[in-house]
Image (cartoon, rainbow, N blue to C red):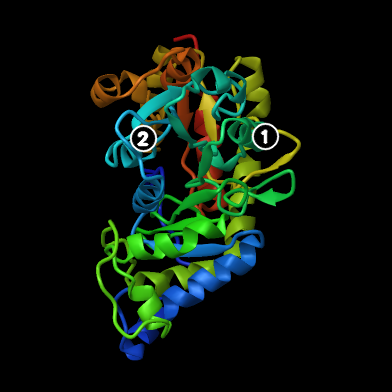
Amino acid sequence: MNNPIPFNRPAWAGNETELITEAFENGWVAGDGPFTKRVQALLELQLIDTEKVLLTTSCTHALEIAAILLDLQPGDEVIVPSYTFVSTALAFLMHGAIPVFADIRPDTLNMDETKLEALITDNTRAIVPVHYAGVGCEMDEIMAIAKAHNLIVIEDNAHGLYAKYKGRHLGTIGHMATQSFHETKNITCGEGGALIINDPTYIERAEIIREKGTNRARFFRGQIDKYTWVDRGSSYVISDILSAFLFGQLSHVDSIQARRKQVWENYREGLTDWATARQIGLPTIPAHCEQAYHMFYLLMPSLEARSAFIQHLKAQQISAVFHYLPLHDSDMGQAEGRAPLGCPVTRDVADRLVRLPFYTDMDEASQKRVIEEIKTFQTGR
């Protein structure tokens, strides 16, 4: 009997345990300790064009900070793709915005920038593009539209750390961006995130919101002699234990990304001919984008074919999964949001997309087995 192959498995870079022990020995395991500062400084160095990185307890919480920074008023709207995780819309809904759902492109599965302007009203405050699978949205067009309408752009870059669009790191192009370090991501600490701030006018208030609405960050820098409650906010600061784990991962980013690139390339090389012959879609990577190697997916001919495909692999103890359900069709999406143009591509993709097992320490034998079992699937049955 073959061993089960999971859809995802978090991988250790090598020295996380030692760094967590060091965090305990530092005597500071709560938020904003030595490792949190080291991680923030390292990310600011690696991403080059950003002004400030603030670690958070999750990508969802980073999105919430961004939402609070918008000072949303009743009736304000924020444009988000329907094909994304619920947090992209929920963070803004929770702080007063109406989510307006945009459709996606049929190639990259990113927000369709050609349909964006038709969704903008006098109440629109922000656009939140999601870089699906770590492949960049068409940010030049999105930023130009935002500038023309005086809108804020917040990149949801949960999938795309270290990916690039026309030579620029994803997450450094909009006014702000968010990152995820959930266990399903390339770089992980189990649960964690970051707010990337590219417009320096947001930095001081973001620090306050992140620290329960207090000016505690200024106090620790010696800029004031006591701190107090000055704004809205919540407890968004990550534990230094998790930051220590994250520092271990980030210190090995080159080897992690190289291995994930190999896994992605193995799928592409092993499945292109099979997929093409059966009219099964593969990921599209535009020439001007450098992807993050976050996932590999197939677009099956139909919902029925996808369901049969998942069951086929499950019978061989291989776990493959579908991805997002359209937010505009959800109970909350229909009750609280709007989709003025509909989202037909989103519905079609949501029915047909399947994600293959993909994790950093996936060995070649396991991946070869997945590819071989995929090739025995008959799409017509």
Residue drawn at x 29%, y 77% as measured from the top left: 227
The numbered mark at residue 214 is none
Which residue type does callout 1 highlight? Answer: Ile
Of 49 and 274, which appears nearest the observer? 49
Q: Is residue 186 left or right of residue 266?
A: left
The numbered mark at residue 89 is 2
Q: Is residue 336 left or right of residue 373?
A: left
- In the picture, the quarter occupied by the N terminus is top left
In the displayed structure, would residue 249 be above or below residue 113?
below
In the displayed structure, would residue 131 be above or below residue 365?
above
Residue drawn at x 66%, y 33% as measured from the top left: 144
In the displayed structure, would residue 21 be above or below residue 104?
below
- Element class at badge 1: loop
Residue drawn at x 56%, y 55% as measured from the top left: 199
Residue 168 image point, x, y percent: 69, 50
Question: How packed is label 2: few (under 14 Cα within 10 Å), some, or many (20 or more)?
Answer: many
- Provide the residue designation for mark 1: 285
Residue 161 image point, x, y percent: 56, 53
Residue 248 visible to an observer of this rendering: no
Residue drawn at x 55%, y 39% as measured from the top left: 131
- Element class at badge 2: helix
Of 219 and 172, which appears nearest the observer? 219
In the displayed structure, would residue 301 be above or below residue 310?
above
Residue 358 image point, x, y percent: 49, 45
